[in-house]
Image (spheres, helix red, strand yellow):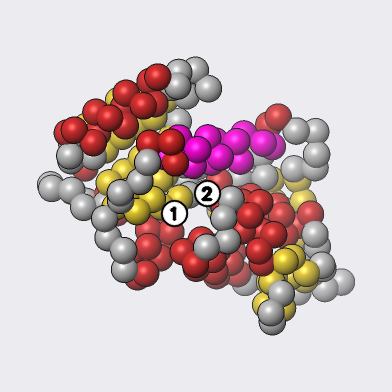
Amino acid sequence: MGEIKVLIVEDDPYLGMMMKECFETRQFKATHVLDGNQGFNRYLEWKPDICVLDVMMPVKDGFSLAKEIRSIDKQIPIVFTTAKSLKEDVLEGFDIGADDYLKKPFSMEELIVRVKAILRRSNSALESNTNTSYCIGRYEFDHTYQLLRLGKKEKKLTSMEADLLKYLCDNLNQTLDRKAVLQKLWGDDNFFNARSMDVFITKLRRYLREDTNVEIINVRGKGYKLLVLD
């Protein structure tokens, strides 16, 4: 973990400094800036491994910054922190491509645990000897590089999208228990995580829609199933 670089974009200077010091005492490298414009410039010059972005900031908000980052980097994990509690705001964050979403106030320990969990998921394919390449109907999916291919077209997935699709592939044509997926990938089956998983399932369905023999179905009262017809 000592080489992991964390970009913190937080307009509250006291909170931002606390977060920075918290990461540094756990052997991360951390940098803190106060607004979205500074955040994007620091992202370009510093090349962090993970971004922790406040949503409500002057100059440029966290959602706008995340969209800019995602336009050039589909892979880097992004965590949003915010005092906004509306479900629509949370879902918007996940739809942009967030890997996690912490509502203020949160403890520094919770932030560290969430970041470490995301990084473990991101690195698991590189550290494992398990299968990381799949054929899904006409699609090819490479979990290690987070790529979904159909012919010459490629779609770069976020780490959570790739992890969820891998879990579905590893259990092809089997029903995945909703709570088990939430506990494995999100670490908690609370309401907001459940809604975020629904957003990711919707996005994966959109990515796979060009092959009519591939479908992710809801199994009422249980969970989801990835079906591939012969």
N-terminal of the pair, mark 1 or mark 2, is 1
Residue ID at (43%, 59%): 94
Residue 220's spot in the image, x, y percent?
69, 82
Q: Is residue 217 above or below residue 18?
A: below
Residue 123's spot in the image, x, y percent?
62, 34
Residue 14 position by quadrant: top left
Q: Is residue 118 visible?
A: yes
Identify residue for label 1: 97
Most frequent secondary structure within the magenta stretch: helix
Q: Amino acid at mark 2?
A: Thr
Tell me where the magenta segment starts and ends, as one range: 111-125
- Secondary structure beneath label 1: loop
Residue ID at (31%, 68%): 86
> For this view, does 207 lie left or right of residue 26?
right
Q: Most extreme residue toward the left, as rendered?
A: 59
What mark, if any, has residue 74 been given in the picture? none
Q: Amino acid at mark 1?
A: Gly
Q: Is residue 217 visible?
A: no
Answer yes or no: do the residues labelled 1 and 2 have beta carbons within 8 Å? yes
> For this view, does 136 lie left or right of residue 204?
right
Q: Is residue 40 above or below residue 210?
A: above
> For this view, does 76 lie left or right of residue 56?
right
What mark, if any, has residue 158 been given in the picture? 2
Residue ID at (67%, 45%): 143
Q: Circle 2: is it few (<14), some (14-19), or many (20+) Cα within 10 Å? A: many
| Of residues 177 and 171, the one drawn nearer to the viewer in this rendering | 177
Residue 27 position by quadrant: top left
Residue ID at (72%, 66%): 177
